[in-house]
Image: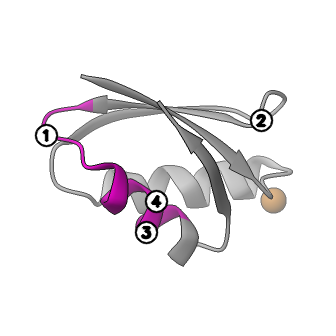
């Protein structure tokens, strides 16, 4: 399954790495793609829970404005 998240606050490659790392540590996550320009994060995996994804990103210091 694929989840697309709109994330506010990412501005550089460090942010990108931080978000990738935070999501990569979650169970079921196989791949994370970050599109800085469009504030878009695409998560690929199994049994992804919106709540868990949101929590991981917020704990890393960014805001999730949308998940679909
Ligand atoms: Cu940054």
State the extent of the magenta-drawn residues as a range.
45-57
The percent position of residue 6, horizontal first and vertical second, equals: 65, 39
- The residue that disc 1 covers is 47
Q: Is residue 8 magenta?
A: no
Quarter, ligand 1: bottom right
Asked if disc 4 and disc 3 are in contact, CB closer than 8 Å, the reply is yes
The response on whether ligand 1 sits within 8 Å of label 1 is: no
- Neighbours of disc 2 within 10 Å: few (<14), some (14-19), many (20+): some
Horizontal side, residue 27 vs residue 68: left or right? left
Q: Residue at x 67, y 65 (%)?
A: 62
Asked if disc 1 and disc 2 are in contact, CB closer than 8 Å, the reply is no
Dominant SS of magenta comes to: helix
Does dot 2 land on a helix, a strand or a loop?
loop
Q: Which mark is residue 36?
A: 2
- Neighbours of disc 1 within 10 Å: few (<14), some (14-19), many (20+): few
In space, the residues marked 4 and 1 are separated at their CA atoms by: 14 Å
The quarter of the picture where residue 37 lies is top right
Of 11 and 55, nearer the camera is: 55
- The residue that disc 3 covers is 55
- The residue that disc 4 covers is 54
Mark 2 or mark 3, which is nearer the start of the sequence? 2
Mark 1 or mark 4, which is nearer the start of the sequence? 1
The percent position of residue 54, horizontal first and vertical second, equals: 46, 59
Does dot 4 land on a helix, a strand or a loop?
helix
Image quadrant where one finds the N terminus: top left
Q: Is 48 drawn above or below residue 35 in the view shown?
A: below
Mark 2 or mark 1, which is nearer the start of the sequence? 2
Q: Residue at x 59, y 61 (%)?
A: 18
Mark 2 or mark 4, which is nearer the start of the sequence? 2
Q: Is 63 drawn above or below residue 7 in the view shown?
A: below
In space, the residues marked 4 and 3 are separated at their CA atoms by: 4 Å
In space, the residues marked 3 and 2 are separated at their CA atoms by: 19 Å
């Amino acid at each position: 399954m694929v989840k697309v998240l709109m994330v506010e606050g990412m501005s550089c490659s460090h942010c990108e790495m931080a978000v990738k790392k935070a999501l990569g540590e979650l169970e079921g996550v196989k791949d994370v793609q970050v599109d800085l320009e469009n504030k878009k994060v695409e998560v690929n995996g199994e049994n992804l829970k919106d709540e868990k994804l949101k929590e991981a990103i917020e704990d890393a210091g960014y805001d999730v404005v949308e998940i679909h």
